Image: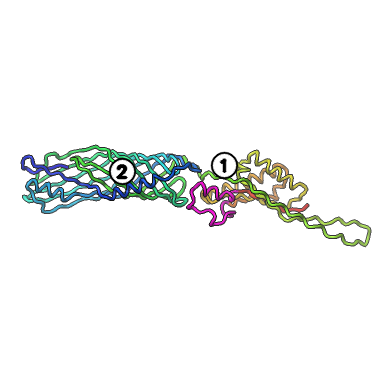
Amino acid sequence: MSAATRTPRSRIIEKPMTTTRRSRLWSLAALGCLGATVASAQDDSSYFYGGLSVGQSRARIDEARITAGLLGAGLTTTAMSRDEHDTAFKLFGGYQLNRYVGLEAGYFRLGEFGFTATTTPAGTLTGRIKLQGANLDLVGTWPLTERLSAIGRIGAQYAQSRDAFTGTGAVAVLDPNPRKNAINPKFGVGLQYEINRSFFVRAEAERYRVNDAVGNNGGVNVFSASIVFPLGRDAAPAPRFAAAPAPRPAEPPPPPPPPMPAPVAVVVPPPPVAPAPRRVSFSADSLFAFDRYDIRPEGKAALDGFVRELQGTRFDRIVVEGHTDRLGTEVYNEGLSRRRAEAVKAYLVDAGAVDAARVTAVGRGESVPVTRPGDCTDRQPRPKLIACLQPDRRVTVEVSGTR
């Protein structure tokens, strides 16, 4: 910003915003986040997104510099009011390259800041600055829990500074509307929470390095909240399945009781033997493709072998249960497990192996895990967590009947 009194060739320069050491701390934090090891994510970690950010911007008016400039022009500052806060917003869009790194571009408006100085001889000097521009950032993400992540950003921003000066009384302004366009760095840190797979929220602190229109360099701090909308993500993360656990061996039927002595020469056959219920567990990936509930050829072969083992058994009841791990939402997991259980039921009925009235299909979702609560924690890296939860993804068939 630039202004002068009526004294010939005298000039007053004001620096509205100054850099503080906090920017160094922010940059180190952002680089620490971005320095994490980049690994291929196991779910759909590449996607486009867009969003909106709103918050408060804070600048610093350099009162000492303004006072010294007025004094050099022969004017004494008697009072000064400062406007160092405003509302900032940003529209942004980006592409998440993988689980840990994304590229983001945006348009921002940091707001308007200014001051009014009263002088002796009588007069006033008023200065305002407006800041807006565009940015391109590299954004790092580091998972803290299954839904909460720390984020850090470092990038470049192209900002336009528009100053406006007015003077009254003893103060005359030489250049009332200077402007400046410049490219400078920006930094930021924050937290991101995944409410669901189509909606995130963020809380961030960012530092914008800016130039005013009269050659001064400063900075603006922005504290904001954002909403983020991922585009094209699947409804649930892609699970990985373990090999099918070996089925439990069927317990041998108890020996038939000795025949009762007959008063007449009539052979009494032994009563039907009711074996203990048999429960067999199939790994989900041995029956279905990812996120599907139509049975693959390999799955049909496994079910055919199971049916052959049950030949000669009169079925009283068959219960087919579908199970998932705890990744994804409860509603989605329950629906997927139920549809898979119904697919197995339909195949057994269509094959002519069982009566549909004697088969029940149930979706248990994630409610009956095989793993214990302490086995698989959310603090594990995503790939290890998915592998640890493999035993929970299964389809079980329990058969009760007589031979």
Q: Position of residue 196 (x, y in %)?
A: 46, 48
10 Å crowding of disc 2: few (<14), some (14-19), many (20+): many
Q: Which residue is mark 1?
A: 290
Q: Position of residue 370 (x, y in %)?
A: 59, 54
Q: Secondary structure at mark 2?
A: strand
Q: Residue at x 87, y 59 (%)?
A: 259
Q: Secondary structure at mark 1?
A: loop
Q: Is residue 42 left or right of residue 62?
A: right
Q: Which residue is mark 2?
A: 186
Determine the main secondary structure of the stretch shown in magenta.
loop
Q: Position of residue 343 (x, y in %)?
A: 63, 44
Q: What kind of residue is marked 2?
A: Lys
Residue range in magenta is 365-393
Q: CA distance from mark 1 to mark 2?
A: 42 Å
Residue 8 in magenta? no
Q: What kind of residue is marked 1?
A: Phe
The quarter of the image holding the N terminus is top left
Q: Is residue 70 left or right of residue 277?
A: left
Q: Residue at x 54, y 45 (%)?
A: 239
Q: Is residue 366 left or right of residue 7?
A: right
